Amino acid sequence: MEESVDFDGLLHAILTCVTAGPGLGFNRAVLFIADDQRAQLTAAMALGPLSPEEAGETWARLATERVSLDELLQSKPRNGCRSALQSKIEGLSIPLDESSPDTEHDHRNPLLRAYHSRRVVKIIDAATLDDIPPSLREVFGGTEVVCVPLVAKERSVGLIVADNAFSREPIGEDRIQLLQLLAMLAGLALDNVRTYRQVERQAQQLKRTLEELRTTQEQLIHNERLATVGAVVARVSHEIRNPLTTIGGFARMLSAHPDEIERVARNAEIIVDEVEKLEALLKEMLDFTSPKPPRLEPTDLNRIISGLANIHRDELSERGVLLKLELAADLPGVLADRHQLQRVFLNLWQNALQSMDDLGVERVRQLSVRTWRDGGTVRVSFSDSGKGIPRTVLPHVFTPFFTTKQRGTGLGLAVVKKIIDDHQGSIEVTIEPPPGTSFIISLPITR
Amino acid sequence: MARILIVDDDDNQRLLYRELLEEEGYDVVEAADGRAALARIGDTAPDVVVLDINMPGMDGLQTLTRIHDLDRRLPVILHSAYAAYREQYVSWIADAYVTKSSNPDELTNTVRAVLARQRDAGG
């Protein structure tokens, strides 16, 4: 596990204080840490020799080197070569049974007794006790042993077990008091590290949560895109299915009644008709997905609008629509692609007429087209007295594939916007005159 | 002879379904939108209505509600190019739902089934 706090360094420092000659001078010490999650005391580190030979060797070396406690504390634990004692106690654990406070003092295991009572327990002869793990009994067997709990905030966080197995020096009351003092400080230090580790774990957890959140967000965005694609596919399939159904139906009829000449001719005409619808749909989709750049030339907007009005004059009277043209006589020309602008105006024109289709007979149907100069731009407005666009829909009218109509791909106004953008112009939509709709286009004047 | 009202704003499709259903031996009347459909129901008393959903003005679903107001027992078959509507509408507001297809069998079979059910219910 990655730890930024040197936990092993702290344990080593504690045990060095317990065992070093210039410190408390115990022959050996083992430090246990309480593992709350696993409800056990785990042997974390041990310092000191395992055999009398090793003891003699170590003490001889230290005697010649005359190392101070400070120097001993500075020396890092030698990870590469674990001591025999360290190897012996590694992996050792003692279960912390959930004893009630009343029975704490009755623990037969002296380590648990010290841990639960938060008091020092001195064992005169460890070999006489059955309830400590065998490997520990092998280490501490036959001598005086002292067990000191590490206490922080009124709870035990660990345990130090120490002895003088080789020097055979009795463990005096003064040593025990000093050991208790050290254990108190060590308990606080360990608790701080534990808190720090918890904070660190929480920080890690937070980091993971953030990463998950980010992944979820990306997934959401992806799903939303899929939903949009789904809506587009549904609409386009509808637009394709209608003509296909008609074509297929009449083609079946052709093969069922090939000898009825008149009917054959009529069905063929209908099929051609519907195929043209499909081609127009295809063209609209392709124009949108791979638009051509405008071929700019000086263009008179008034002329395009007059032309449009002339072509559709009959249609206007059929639909009972009054056309009001207000075209500025001195309108400057613009650099524009005439065919693309024709398409823009035709689209706005048809939208205006459609919006007035369902009005009651008594309602006025009026389409006003105006052109005027406004500073460095030329403006064109299409205003209708139709049923209008709901305010909530207004921001979406230029969004591709967005439509409230029963027919069409929802690309009309998106194409209009694209063409105007390509001309460095702008287009806006307003509810004017209420409840009708106005589209106002601005295009830069030719320089 | 059973009478069928076809409601569709697409002229070619109305013609197609008229001819298909006439070949099956039905008497066919037509309406191009919801308003006309309600008027036709009043003056021709059809036995079943084949109703398109996507129509300008009063759409098929609005029309369906109005038909129910007029005569709750008149069977209505929704007929649309939108396959996605099927789940939503088939069971609880219409008597049947047929996705438009170049193969007329599903429509003619459904018309036959709805009429049979109507006859059984009527005794």
Image (cartoon, coloured by chain):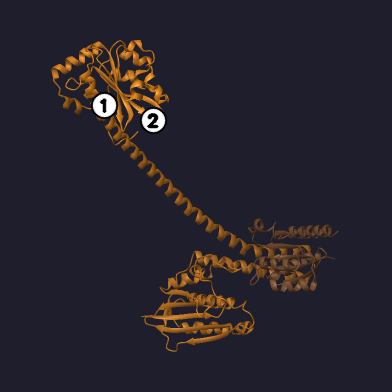
Q: Is residue A282 visible?
A: yes
Amino acid under disc 2: Asp
Q: A130 or A248, which lies in front? A: A130
Amino acid under disc 1: Ala
Chain B rendered in what hue?
A: brown
Q: Which residue is mark 1?
A: A183
Chain holding disc 1: A
- From the image, state whether disc 2 or disc 1 is nearer to you: 1
Q: Residues within 10 Å of mark 2 (few under 14, many from 20)?
A: few
Horizontally, residue A96 falls left or right of residue A322, namely left
Chain A rendered in what hue?
A: orange
Residue at the bottom extreme? A329
Chain holding disc 2: A
Q: Residues within 10 Å of mark 1 (few under 14, many from 20)?
A: many
Q: Which residue is mark 2?
A: A36
Under circle 1, the secondary element is helix
Q: CA distance from mark 2 to mark 1?
A: 19 Å
Mark closer to the chain start, 2 or 1: 2
The number of callouts visible is 2
Residue A256, quarter of picture: bottom right
Under circle 2, the secondary element is loop
